[in-house]
Amino acid sequence: MRRCSVITAGHLQRDHIAAVEGLHGPVTIDRRCADLAELVAAARTGKADAVLIIGETETITGSLLTEFTEPGLVVVAVSDVSEERARLRALGIVALPDTVDAKTLTDALRGLPVPEQSADEDLLGAPAAVGKELDDVPVDPADVQAAAVHHSGAESEAPPGRTQEGEGAPGGQHPLDAELAELLSAAETTRSRREAASAEPTQEEPTQEEHTQEEHTPDDRPLAAAGTGSARDDDAVRAAGAARRGTTGRDDAGPQNADLRAAAEEDAGEEDSGAALRRPGITTVWGAPGSPGRTTVAVNLAAELALTGARVLLIDADTVASSAATHLGLLEESAGLAQACRQADLGRLDAARLRRALTVVDICGYRLHLLTGLPRADRWPELRGGALRQVLQRAARDFSHVVVDVAAPTEHDEELTFDTRAPQRHAATITAVEEADTLLAVGGPDPVSFPRLVKALDDLRLNLPQAPEPQVLINQIRREAVGRAPEDQLREAWDRFGSGEALETFLPWDRAACDDALLTGRVLAESAPQSALRHAIADLAGATLPTRRRRLLRR
C-alpha cells in the first residue's frame, strides 16, 4: 500500500493527529506547521501528498488554495463551524466536522470518496427542513413593509442614469432596505401561492416557463413597456436617454413628446421581434494593442442585446484602462468586478451577492447590468484568474448574454520574472478569452493598427491555444486611412498576411456619433440611433432595426 505523506497545521478540541497516527496505516503525518504561511512553504517543497488544515480556516481563499492544488496535493479541512464547512466545499475542499472519525479522515487524505453523512452529519437534510419551517411560518406583508419603513434611513442621491443593486440599490437605498424589499416580495409570493393552493387543490404543476418567470426579480424586467429596442423613433430614443440621466429637453413635458413615445410604441408593435440574436453565452471583446475601439464595440453590443429584452451583463475586465462606466455616464469609483471576485475567492459568490455588486443602467426603458472595472490599473491583483472564472461561470448561469471587455495583452510574463508562483498581470484577459463562447477580435484599418491585429492573433494562438476561434472585425473603416474601396483592399491584404480566419465584418468610421455619445454618456442607440455604426453593431448583435421612420403630426 502506497504511503501517504501529510503536512498539517492548526488544532481543535479533538486530537486528530494522534487519532490518524494511532491507526498505523499508510497515512503518516510528516510535519506539523505553526501556521498557514509555514504550511504553504512546506507544500512548495513537493515532499507531501496531502494537506490537512484543522481549525483557523477563515483565511483560506481560492488564491491560497491554488498553492496546494497546482502541485496536485489533496486538501482536507476540519472545522467545527457548519457555515465555514459549506464555504470551504464551495472552494472545492473536502471539509469535515470536528467529530469525524479517524478512518474517514484518512480516507479523505488519501483522496478516497467520503460518505456524505460522515462529511457533515449536522447539515444533512438541513436546507429542506429549514425551507419547510419557513414556509409554515405565516408572514404578513404589512409587517414586513412596516419593518422596511422603520429601518429605512436617509436616501442617498444616486448619479443620474444609474441604479446599483446592493450598495446603492434602486433609488439610492441602503442595502438593508433592498433586503427588506426582497423579503416583502417573498412574503407576498408565499401568501399568493397559499391562497391559490387553497382555492385550487388540484392545481397542475407549473410549467418550466412559469418557473423561470417566478425566479426573475423585479429588477430583471423592462423598466417600461415600450416594445423592443429594435424599433424606436430617433426622438423617442433620445427622450428616453435624457429621462434616464435626469435631464429633459425643452419639449419633453409637452404633448409632442407624448406623441413621440406613442409612435415608438406603435412602431414596436408593428416590427417583427423574432430576430435571430447572437448565440447566448459569454462574448469576449478582445483586440490588438492600441485603441481599435474594443470598449465602444463591447458597450454598444451589450446595449443592443439589452434592447431586445434579453438579460445582459456587461463586465469591464480591462486591467489596463477600464472605461465602460465612463461610456455609460457613470462617475463612481467603485469596482463592482473586484467585489464579485473577492466573494468568489472566499467561496461565497452566489446570485444574491453577484446582484449586490451590479450596477443597473437604463437603456431606453430596458435594463443593462454592469460590473464596473478597476478605477486604477495598479489594482490588477484583485482580479485573480480563478476568482474571475467563477464570476464568469456564475454570470453565465444568471444571464442570457455576458459581454466582457478586456485588454490586449495575453502573455504569461510574470512566470519568467519570479522564482515563485506569482499572480499574472493579464490573468483577467487570459481567463475571459479562455471562458468565451464567442471571441471578437477588434482591429483598425490603418497601416499601424492592421499589422498589430495580424501579430496579436499569432500571439493569441501561441499563448492561448485552447481559445475559441476568433471572429475578426475591422473597426473605424474609412477611405482616408486605406484608400478607395477600403473593404476590398483590406480583404486582399488579409488573404496575404492573415492567419486563415475569414474577414467579413467591417464597422464604419463615425467619429461625430462616437464623440457625442461619449460626451453625453449615452450609447449609440440613444445619441445616434440612425448612424451607420449603430446599425452595423446591431447587425453584429443579430438585432433587427426599423427601416423606415414614422412621420408625426403636430397638434
Image (spheres, grey):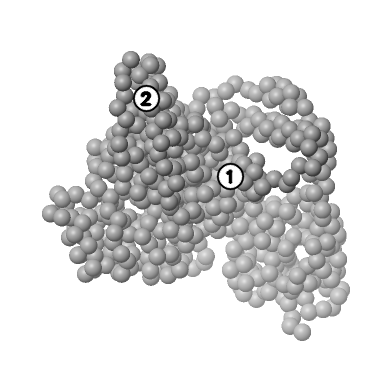
Residue type at mark 2 is: Leu
**Do we see residue 302 in this rendering?**
no
Q: Position of residue 398 (x, y in %)?
A: 57, 48
Residues at discs 2 and 1 in contact (Cβ within 8 Å): no
Classify residue 346 as left or right of residue 474.
right
Q: Quadrant of the N terminus?
A: bottom right
Residue type at mark 1 is: Leu
Taking depth in this image into account, of 220 and 266 the one nearest to the observer is: 266
Residue 502, compared with residue 194, is above or below; it is: below
Q: Name the disc covering residue 240, or none.
A: none
Q: Position of residue 316 (x, y in %)?
A: 44, 47
Asked where in the image residue 165 lies, by quadrant, the reply is top right
Q: Quadrant of the C terminus?
A: top left
**Do we see residue 392 in this rendering?**
yes
Question: Residue placed at 50% from the left, 27% from the top?
Answer: 158
Residue 124, compared with residue 259, is above or below; it is: below
Q: Position of residue 140 (x, y in %)?
A: 77, 27
Taking depth in this image into account, of 462 and 162 the one nearest to the observer is: 162
Q: Secondary structure at mark 2?
A: helix
Q: Secondary structure at mark 1?
A: helix
Mark 1 surroundings within 10 Å by alpha-carbon count, few (fewer than 14), some (14 through 19), many (20 or more): many
Classify residue 530 as left or right of residue 248.
left
Q: Position of residue 163 (x, y in %)?
A: 51, 32
Residue assigned mark 2:
260
Question: Residue placed at 83% from the left, 41% from the top?
Answer: 133
Disc nearest the viewer among 2 and 1: 2
Residue assigned mark 1:
354
Task: Indicate which disc, 2 or 1, sits on the residue closer to the N terminus.
Answer: 2
